[in-house]
């Protein structure tokens, strides 16, 4: 995929396909809905994203949150001119996932010229919050030399 052409109208199928051989694909993260300033996704519990004992790993939750927020920022900026760098992720785990899938919604709460801040809530299939995260992305002009 030519990421310089990335924008809000990029089809979900292309975004998901381009993530298959990355950490995103290995964790089983799938993008399900995109709007300006909002991204939704899901992640099925598997051996690749669980901790010993079979529960969803807290680090997988944070990677899920950073993935959605990062893509959200990439879709907002002119990605041919600017790079998006995750500079801070923090989260609180409020529950567990023992089976099924987690769903997440990332919403931008600050859209500045140099930083974007996202809130990401991860829920189980019953809609119970299992993790909430705050993600800060730095927007940096690309050095195209």
Image (spheres, rainbow, N blue to C red):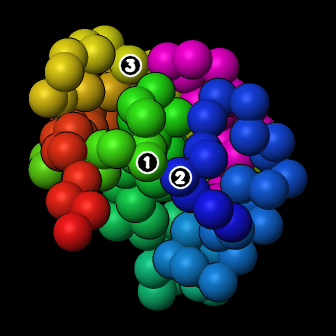
Question: In the picture provided, is 86 more to the left or to the right than 1?
Answer: left
Question: Residue 116 or 142: which is nearer the viewer?
Answer: 142
Residue shown at 56%/57% (left/top)?
A: 3
Residue 105 visible to the viewer = no
Residue 143 figure quarter: bottom left
Q: Which residue is mark 2?
A: 4
Q: Is residue 121 above or below residue 112?
A: below
- Disc 1 crowd, CA 10 A, few/some/many (<14, 14-19, 20+): some
Label placed on residue 80: 1
In the depicted view, which residue is nearer to us: 135 or 43?
135
Instruction: State the CA–CA distance, disc 1 to disc 3.
Output: 21 Å
Q: CA distance from mark 1 to mark 2?
A: 4 Å
Task: Give residue 49's position: percent from left, percent from top.
Answer: 54, 75
Decide which of tag 1 and tag 2 comes sooner along the chain.
Answer: 2
**N-terminal of the two: label 1 or label 3?**
1
Point out which mark residue 96 bears.
Answer: none
Image spot of residue 66 (x, y percent):
37, 50
């Amino acid at each position: 995929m030519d990421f310089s052409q990335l924008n809000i109208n990029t089809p979900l199928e292309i975004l998901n396909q381009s993530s298959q051989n990355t950490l995103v694909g290995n964790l089983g993260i799938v993008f399900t809905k995109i709007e300006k300033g909002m991204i939704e996704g899901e992640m099925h519990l598997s051996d690749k994203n669980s901790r010993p004992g079979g529960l969803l790993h807290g680090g997988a939750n944070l990677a899920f949150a950073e993935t959605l927020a990062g893509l959200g920022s990439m879709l907002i900026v002119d990605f041919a001119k600017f790079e998006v760098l995750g500079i801070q992720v923090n989260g609180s785990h409020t529950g567990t996932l023992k089976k099924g899938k987690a769903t997440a919604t990332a919403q931008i709460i600050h859209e500045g010229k140099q930083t974007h801040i996202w809130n990401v809530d991860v829920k189980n299939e019953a809609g119970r919050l299992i993790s909430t995260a705050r993600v800060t992305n730095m927007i940096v002009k690309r050095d195209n030399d």
